[in-house]
Amino acid sequence: MTALSRFKPRLVGSVWRGIIKPRSDIDIEVDYTDPEPIKKTLQE
């Protein structure tokens, strides 16, 4: 979340609701118009 902070990340889904299981996905939504800067940030 810190690495994506400039994209205003939001945790959504079951983890946000507190329903955490061993195979729970962690879903993060971000605001963007171009996905390339987000891809670069995640690869760093």
Image (cartoon, rainbow, N blue to C red):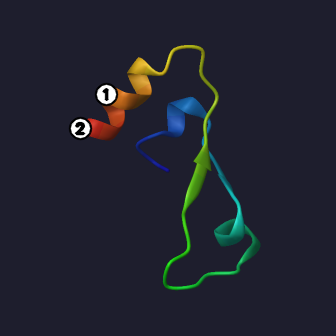
Q: Residue at x 37, y 30 (%)?
A: 39
How far across and how far down the image is residue 27, in percent? 59, 55
Q: Quadrant of residue 43?
A: top left
Q: Quadrant of residue 40?
A: top left
- Answer above or below: position of 40 versus 13: above
Secondary structure under the numbered disc 2 in the rendered image: loop
Residue 27 position (above or below residue 40): below
Give the residue furthest to the top: 33
Screen quadrant of the C terminus: top left
Identity of the residue drawn at 54% across and 62% down: 26
Residue at which label 1 appears: 40
**On screen, residue 23 above or below 44:** below
- Whether residues under marks 2 and 1 lie with C-beta atoms below 8 angstroms apart, the answer is yes
Q: Residue 44 bears which disc, if any? A: 2
Above/below status of 4 relative to 34: below
Give the amino acid type for the residue marked by disc 2 in the picture: Glu
Which amino acid does the dot numbered 1 rest on?
A: Lys
Mark 1 secondary-structure assignment: helix
Cα distance between the residues tagged 2 and 1: 6 Å
Q: Is residue 39 left or right of residue 28?
A: left
Q: Position of residue 25 (x, y in %)?
A: 54, 66
Structural crowding at the residue carrying mark 1, measured as other residues with C-alpha within 10 Å and reported as few (<14), some (14–19) or many (≥20): few
Q: Position of residue 33 (x, y in %)?
A: 60, 14
